[in-house]
Amino acid sequence: MNSLLKRQIRKYLPKELQANPELEKFLNAINGSYKTSEEQFAMLQRATRISSEELFNANQKLQEETTAQKSIIKKLESVIDKLQFYDLKNDRPTESTDSLKLVDFIDNQTKEIITINQQKDKLLKSLERQNQELNDYAHMVSHDLKSPLQSIEALTTWIIEDYSETLDTSCRESLQLIKENVEKMDTLVKGILQYSTIDKLEKEKYNVNLDALVHEILNNIKKDENVIFNIPEKLPTIQGDRFRLEKLFTHLIDNAVKFNRKEKIIVEIGFEEENDFWKFYIKDNGNGIAEKYFDKIFVAFQKLEDDFNSTGIGLSIVKKIIEVYKGEIYLESELEVGSTFYFTIKK
């Protein structure tokens, strides 16, 4: 334990406790728990950040390969058009060279498609393996962190309760700060566990009344009197599961309120119905986000502001939930004007 912290704890304890040999065991217990938690949390954060970057880069590569495959398909469509033009069944060209060239071209393009698909399969298997390893690691470390965090919280609570009459204001504030940091770590651990499992949970789809769900969220969310929520029309009832949809709307609405320095905070929630999707938006008049960060904000542990209460994992969970519903999310934003998050959910 830091010698200064140990000195401060001894300083404010009664003299009979300062000389008590059991006190050293108590201080060592706190130090051991805190050190273990800090090391395991650092390991978890590094592993999750690296894996998130690998998954992001792999996704970019898949998108590039998909674009290349679409180009090949267009070429094949052009070849088919030529074959139809020649009507080879009834009226073959007199010169065989053109037909041979078309056959060779189709053969080459087919081989190229096969090669791309083989590379894609290999990459997807690698991604699946890495994702499973990340999930297993997150489960293990999250479970191991619970015990020392609970120990630290219990010890600080006991000190406050048992020595409330002897502790001065400064000491109580320090102990309270320890409890707040433990709660912050506990929230982050739960967030990491949620991030690693949110797309793996088996949930049956059923009718969810979004209008009732969102109004319940608005009633429970922490807000001041200067916050105004605007829902132009009644939100629809859609097929999904309440757990994921509640997490989805809660994170987006909470961010719209939390990252807003305006005297009057306005958050608008709306939707429109498309053929195969429901398209929703959550609009705010807040701080706004620079365009260069549009992709970064959906990566785990990426925070644009040094907010003590923010874990930097909320939007990455939102993106995973939307992917479960086979939808997409994007945003429009202007600094100091506001942001609008658009997302779709497949019917």
Image: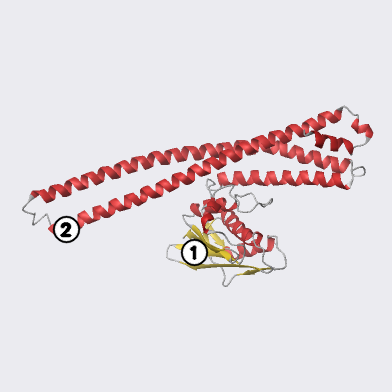
Residue in the picture at 60% in, 38% down: 44
> Which residue matches tag 1?
279
Q: Is the Cβ of the residue at disc 1 closer than 8 Å to that at disc 2?
A: no
Quadrant in the rendering for residue 188 = top right
- Which percent across, then down, holds residue 337? 59, 67
- Identified by mark 1, the residue type is Lys
Furthest toward the bottom, the residue is 232
Query: Vertically, is 286 above or below 315?
Result: below
Query: Vertically, is 132 above or below 63?
Result: above
> Which residue matches tag 2?
84
Relative side of 270 to 124, left or right: right
- Which percent across, then down, holds residue 197? 56, 45
- Is disc 2 surrounded by few (<14), some (14 to 19) or many (20+) residues within 10 Å? few
Picture mark count: 2
- Is disc 1 surrounded by few (<14), some (14 to 19) or many (20+) residues within 10 Å? some
Q: Nearer the viewer, residue 254 or 324?
A: 254
Of callouts 1 and 2, which one flags the residue occurring earlier in the amino acid sequence?
Answer: 2
- Asked which colour scheme the image uses, the reply is secondary structure
Q: Nearer the viewer, residue 95 or 243?
A: 95
Furthest toward the left, the residue is 94
Residue 92: which numbered mark, if any? none
Relative side of 22 to 286, left or right: right
- Identified by mark 2, the residue type is Gln
Helix, strand or loop at label 2? It is: helix
Q: Nearer the viewer, residue 165 or 243?
A: 165
Furthest toward the right, the residue is 15
Query: Vertically, is 301 above or below 207?
Result: above
Work out which quarter of the rendered image holds the N terminus and state it. top right
Residue in the picture at 66% in, 35% down: 39
For the residues labelled 1 and 2, the Cα–Cα distance comes to 40 Å
Helix, strand or loop at label 1? It is: strand
